[in-house]
Amino acid sequence: MRSFAATLLVLAFCSSAMAQSNPPPLSPQCEAPGSDIAANAPLAHLAERLEKGGPLRILAIGSSSTTGVGASSRRKTYPAQLRGILESALKGVEAQITNRGVSGEVAATTADRLRMEVALEKPDVVLWQLGTNDALARVSAADFERTVSSTVEWLKGNDIDVVLVGLQYTPKFARDENYFIIRQTLQKVASEHNVLHVRRYDAMQFIARHQPGSESLVSGDDLHLNDTGYQCMAEHVAHAVIANLFVRKKDLPKIEPPSK
Amino acid sequence: MRAPNEIDFWRGFALITIFIDHVPGLVFENYTMRNFGLSDAAELFVFLAGWSMRLLVDGRRGRMSVLESTLRLESRAITIFTVQMILTQLALAITAAGALIFENPLFLEWNNAAAAFQEPVETQIGLALLTHQLFYFDILPLYVVLMFMAPLFVIADRTARWLPLALGLTIYLATHITGMNIPTWPVEGRWYFNPFAWQLNFVLGFVVADPKGVLSFTRNHRTLLRILAAPIVLVSLWLALTDFTPNPLSMPQPRLLFTFDKTFAAPARILHLLALVALFSGLFAVISRLLPSITSFLSLLGRNSLYVFSLGSITALLSQYVRYELGSSLWVDTGVLGVGIIIMGFTAWIVEWRGRQRGS
């Protein structure tokens, strides 16, 4: 807990040092420390687009959490909610979000689709939600790492920012070894390539532990998010994106991600 | 029943290939034609459908009138639509049963099925409108659109022999330049088989099959064509073996023309298909002499392709669960392939048997 408080302090200091960055406050039910949401990494191309006055072109790709399985309507999916949050936070800037989620898909399949979708949509940033299906389909960590690394490298090489949106937390998989390994691998790839990684698992776990009795984020099947869950997912991604819009490489504080 | 012929034979070949490709992870999927070139069995299947349309409208009884061919093609479109509805419903039932049997709600997501269970109200409409498709159950919607559009090409053909190809190429180029495709709903996305791009495979089959058409010169210069086709097939083989794909972002506009994309039936894939056709047309004569039983079996499948495809698709889906339960091994996979071929063969046999019963 002490190290967590220290991290919070460091982060608070950093964000005050970067007066420009002003992520919108999180709703009470989505409250989680910034350090549990994402470590800082630059989003240079998105920032450049913002400086030109937008519109921000965002490609949201991934599996069921991107299509919005469990949401009560299309407007409640995380990309749809994210759009609202971004547009109100970056007053006057349009955010065009294309949703290309396909339920039940592993990262390798998404990676195949991703290149063509990128060529068609020409986004400034790709939000790639991944990992859960790979863990359940028992994809080996080495294969998963190779897929994610090569795709991230390709995106960076083509001047497109990438945000990796990680695995979700459900008590059901808290002890699943494969789940842990895939989560660790994703974290490793993100820090090796210095790309933004929204650690949904940590953020959701924090909420589950610190807000007992609050409205649950997952639906009855214990696997998929409900509207509140998608709202928090959108808020966390928005928080990470906006906090990092103005980060330059040289400004980056050296913070070790919490080892968990 | 018509005797084994080249079209039915290759269609049977494509049907078995499609079955193998529709069981993800199956050992044999590493040895189907897509691993040795750019195009795959889907292109061959659609090309042969165009060829069949030529045989239909310029049939033995002489040239069919525009009205008659329109009625025939549109009723075929309705038949295929009906089959698609039944297949999708069966696939959803299997998916739901899988989730119950294995007590794992994640199975409901397999093959893009999630929306049918999570958003049933919208998705029921989407399934009927063909704007929601399950993986591996997405080629018949393409056929529905192709058959629906087909009279347009027949009318063009009756107007001038060069017109179908010109029309097909124009639609194809417009599609590649604008990136147009049919959107999916309620899940946001696009059709996997873009009919505006894929129609060119169909039109090419229709035009190549015309003995007096604009591509009829191909029939008189087979040796020259083979000499031209061989390097294309070899380069494709090398590209497939080295897993090379062009980076779509470093290509000039219109980018889609320079990729190997399947959704947009990229030119490279079509060129490869045509090269395969040029190189291997006539091989049937050799195979039918050397391996008469295989020839008649594949032709049997090809003669009854809609039924065989349907049962093959359902068997392939069931095989996904069999492999989940039994794990993957050469024994399991060989069993899956063997059972699949037997079911497809039996399906074709019983359809013809029933036809003979009716006829007698």
Image (spheres, rainbow, N blue to C red):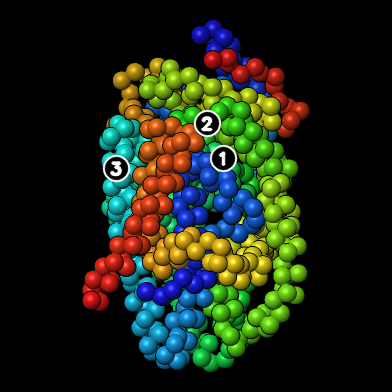
Location of mark 1 (residue): A108
Indicate which disc, 2 or 1, sits on the residue closer to the N terminus.
1
Q: Amino acid at mark 1?
A: Ala
Q: Amino acid at mark 3?
A: Ala
Location of mark 2 (residue): A139
Foreground: B317 or A114?
B317
Q: Does any portion of residue B148 appear in the rendered image?
A: yes
Say which residue appears at 52% left-offset and 31% top-offset: A139
Is mark 1 in CB contact (under 8 Å) with mark 3?
no
x%, y% of residue A40? 64, 27
Pointer 3 indicates a residue of which chain? B
Q: Mark 2 and mark 1: span between their CA atoms?
A: 10 Å
Q: Which mark is residue B96?
A: 3
- Mark 3 surroundings within 10 Å by alpha-carbon count, few (fewer than 14), some (14 through 19), many (20 or more): some
Task: Give the side of residue B265 with respect to residue B75, left or right.
Answer: right
Q: Where B247 falls versus B319 (above or below)?
A: below
Q: Where B11 falls versus B250 (above or below)?
A: below
Instruction: Give the position of the C terminus of chain B as an image quadrant.
Output: bottom left
Task: Give the side of residue B340 with respect to residue B269, left or right.
Answer: left
Q: Does any portion of residue A87 appear in the rendered image?
A: no
Q: Where B290 falls versus A195 (above or below)?
A: below
Foreground: B236 or B341?
B341
Q: Are marks 1 and 3 on the same chain?
A: no
Pointer 2 indicates a residue of which chain? A
- Mark 1 surroundings within 10 Å by alpha-carbon count, few (fewer than 14), some (14 through 19), many (20 or more): some
Foreground: B283 or A29?
B283
x%, y% of residue B130? 38, 62
